[in-house]
Image (cartoon, helix red, strand yellow):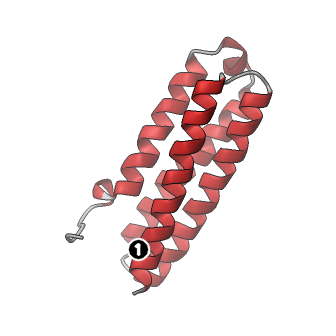
Amino acid sequence: MGKITRFEDLEIWIEARRISKKLYDLIQANEELKRDHRFKSQILAAIGSVMDNAAEGFERGGTKEFKQFLSVAKGSVGEVRSQVYRAYDFGYFDQENFESLLLELQNLSGKISNFITYLSK
C-alpha cells in the first residue's frame, strides 16, 4: 500500500461516499421515504458518519486514534445495514436494491476491518 496523504484517497472513504450518494438517490426516487423525515435523516446521518469518522481519524495523525475512529465507522456501517433491512421491510427498497446495498455494506465493513488489522501491524 502506498503512502496516503489525504483522507480523500482512502478507499473506505471513497466507497462510503459512493454508497452515501446511492442511498440519497434511492431516497429521492421514493416519495414515501422522502416524507419519512426521521428515518431518512437517520440513514443518511449513519452513512455520513462512516465517511466523517474515517476522515477525522485520518486527520488526527495518530495510528491509535485512527483505529478508534475506524472502529466507530465500522459500527456505523452496521447501523446502516440494519436500517437497510428496515427500509426493505417498510417497502422503501425493492429486493434488488436491498441485496445490492447489503452486499456493498458488508464489503465496506470487511475493508474497514482489514484496514484496522493493517494499521495494527
Please indicate whether residue 89 sits to the left or right of residue 77 in the image.
right
The residue wearing badge 1 is: 60
Question: Residue type at mark 1?
Answer: Arg
Please indicate whether residue 80 sits to the left or right of residue 20 in the image.
right
Residue 47 locus on image (x, y percent): 56, 46
Residue 92 locus on image (x, y percent): 70, 22
Please indicate whether residue 3 sits to the left or right of residue 59 in the image.
left
Q: Taking 17 as reference, is 11 above or below it?
A: below
Residue 12 locus on image (x, y percent): 41, 56
Residue 98 locus on image (x, y percent): 63, 32
Count of residue discs: 1
Q: Residue at x 49, y 31 (%)?
A: 22
Q: Quadrant of residue 18?
A: top left
Q: Residue at x 60, y 53 (%)?
A: 77
User: Most extreme residue toward the left, as rendered?
Assistant: 2
User: Most extreme residue toward the bottom, as rendered?
Assistant: 121
Q: Taking 52 as reference, is 41 above or below it?
A: above
Label 1 Cα crowd, 10 Å radius (few <14 / some 14-19 / many 20+):
few
User: Most extreme residue toward the right, as rendered?
Assistant: 90
Which quadrant: the N terminus?
bottom left
Q: Quadrant of residue 40?
A: top right
Please indicate whether residue 96 sits to the left or right of residue 20 in the image.
right
User: Most extreme residue toward the top, as rendered?
Assistant: 31
Which quadrant: the C terminus?
bottom left
Q: Residue at x 70, y 21 (%)?
A: 33
Front in this rendered view, residue 114 or 8: 114
**Secondary structure type for disc 1:** helix
